[in-house]
Amino acid sequence: MFDTLSDRLTGIFAKLKGKGRLTDADIDATAREIRLALLEADVALPVVKAFIARLKERARGAEVHGALNPAQQVIKIVHEELVGVLGGEARRLQFAKHPPTVIMLAGLQGSGKTTLAGKLARHLKGLGHQPLLVACDLQRPNAVNQLQVLGGRAGVEVYAPQPGNGVGDPVQVAKDSIEHARRAMRDIVIVDTAGRLGIDTEMMRQAADIRDAVQPDEVIFVIDAMVGQDAVATAEAFRDGVGITGVVLSKLDGDARGGAALSVREVTGSPILFASTGEKLEDFDVFHPDRMASRILG
Ligand code: GDP
């Protein structure tokens, strides 16, 4: 992820090396190249526009001082603006005052929700919590089984409808799981929900019904970082249809251009909480805007 963008930015900054002072023309030329690099990385246009406007304003106003030469100064500004676009400070999960804390996962089918459920459960267990995984994706035939396998690997209980009970009602399963969590003294409930290949009203309604049934402390929107420009429309649909409190970027290990990662915070207004970086349960980390910005700058 971000390899092309990193290379492009390195090339752009290299041209500034050795310059004593940056003229407005230098700044404009650099800003234009960075604009192109971001667009080619699939970053959403409004995000790029705002980024470039801030960059220009700051680069023009920057005092030439201290140990930083003009090229380093521009790099510093780009770094800080990237951190801003990615959300600034790392944001931790919000826990309920009265357990259990309920975390609901939402997103398109294939975005990595079920995998994330397992990762999150493992992560939280490692922090000393007693999570319960809840299988409310009753649409995808294998989703319940997949969650049970992941739960087994993470050593975390999975609450699922009994086999043979037909398709089952995911809203009822979600509701019952909270009761079960209370009885079984689980302090965190992670609810995996169904996704579709595209956004549709039925899926949104089901997700909203599950949300109303479990009153989640966090609604985490899982987005496949490989999806490029479509990410923005999907993120907006989930923000408006279900309401989201946080985002997880999945498949950050892929070699896509990374625009989704750079757009989703500004588009949804919700912080990126975690990064999913592979198929294994341990391929998972708390999301640090600062570290990600440094990675992009190479
Ligand atoms: P869901 O339909 O949203 O529940 O998506 P799944 O969790 O079933 O994931 C869909 C596919 O993506 C599966 O093959 C996962 O193994 C894979 N996957 C999930 N997260 C990641 C990730 O971070 N990196 C990679 N490379 N693959 C992932």
Image (cartoon, helix red, strand yellow):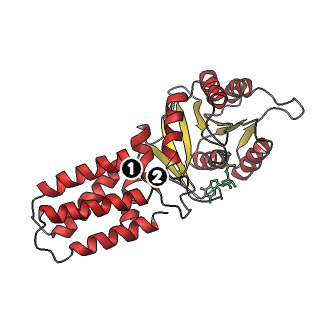
Mark 2 and mark 1: span between their CA atoms?
8 Å
The answer to whether 212 is drawn above or below residue 49 in the figure is above
Q: Quadrant of residue 254?
A: bottom right
Name the residue rendered at 17%, 66% in the picture: 26
Name the residue rendered at 74%, 39% in the picture: 158
Q: Which residue is mark 1?
A: 86
Q: Which residue is mark 2?
A: 261
The answer to whether 208 is drawn above or below residue 80 in the figure is above
Foreground pick, 7 / 298: 7
Name the residue rendered at 62%, 25% in the picture: 214
SS of the residue under disc 2: helix
Q: Relative to 250, is 163 on the left or the right?
A: right
Q: Position of residue 80 (x, y in %)?
A: 28, 55
The answer to whether 283 is drawn above or below residue 298 in the figure is above
Q: Position of residue 242 (x, y in %)?
A: 55, 29
Depth check, mark 2 against mark 1: the one in front is 2
Residue 68 seen in render? no
Labels 2 and 1: the sequence-earlier one: 1
Disc 1 residue: CB within 8 Å of ligand 1: no
Q: Residues within 10 Å of mark 2 (few under 14, many from 20)?
A: many
Foreground pick, 202 / 167: 202
